[in-house]
Amino acid sequence: MKSVIYPKVSIISINYNGASVTCELLESLKQITYPNIEVIIVDNASKEDPSSILKNHPWIKFIRSETNLGFAGGNNLGLHVATGDYFLLLNNDTEVDPGFLEPIIELMENDSTIGVASPKIIFHHSPGVIQFAGFNPINHYTGRGTSIGFGQKDIGQFNQSHETSRAHGAAMMISRKVVEKVGLMADLFFLYYEEMDYCERIKKAGFSIWYESGSVVYHKESMSTGKGSTLKTYYLTRNRLLFQRRNVQGIKLFISIIFFTLVSIPKNSIQYVIHGKIDMLKAFWKGILWNITAKDIHKNESLI
């Protein structure tokens, strides 16, 4: 009988002031059936060193950064020490099905043109409700896109794997050959939109991106930044504009700028004022002003 070969998977997750949540992920990862993994936890300068909590998991590789490098920078730090054939960037606020790795690795092993793949993502606190079953393309003019199946009860309607416009940052499998060719994520994003930008670069390099329906991950949405936080508002605003500037050209970029100036900026500003959310208004405008002053926006991180 021919022996089965299991490519090594490096699972990389970022911890930031959430050691207890990270431990829940690690307990979940202990149950998986795939036999060839390493788990790398990168601590992004949490207020309290999580080493004492994570010591109960001696099987992991632990890296503590002295500065907060953001989502992209923290994952890049993990990628530098990862030894796998594949790299799974996995949010610490997730839990996984025991057999979630086999389908996604089989998909990528059977088609060398697939550079990135994401699993079906279910809302952890809303059992059976879909967060992600693929993405529709980002609108060139608004910088927004929609998630396929979002909010729908999972009754098998998205049980067919397919090519998609981009992967989901909560769980994205990347082949080593992609990172060696394209490089790392651009850490100037810090938080939000970095995986979307990365997927655009990967597609330009000739690789496709897929949704794998047979792999399931459960996501505890927004536990690290908080729902409706000023931090989230700032980076979503800042990086939505940054993504457009890096990935849209010519007349489409011009129309996009007009849309932001005449529609998005006035609409959001008025809504924040009407609802008395002055802190959110300040964060929103801070994100806009960053783009007005930022110049070196096309810098990418080097190869591993």
Image (spheres, rainbow, N blue to C red):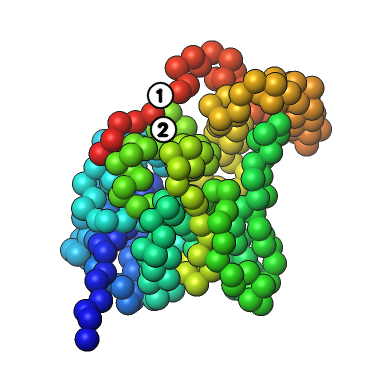
Whole-percent x and y of residue 288? 62, 22
Label 1 sits on residue: 299
Label 2 sits on residue: 186
Residue at 26% in and 64% down: 7
**Quadrant of the rendered structure where residue 111 is?**
bottom left
Q: Is residue 39 left or right of residue 266?
A: left
Q: Is 112 placed above or below 74 here? A: below
Distance Cα–Cα, label 1 vs label 2: 7 Å
Q: Is residue 195 left or right of residue 183?
A: right
Whole-percent x and y of residue 181? 33, 39
Residue at 56% in and 39% down: 232
Whole-percent x and y of residue 248? 60, 28
Q: Is mark 2 on a helix, strand or loop?
A: loop
* 302 vs 5, nearest the viewer: 5
Which mark is on residue 139? none
Tag 1: Cα neighbours inside 10 Å, few (<14), some, or many (≥20)?
few
Q: What element carries label 1?
A: loop
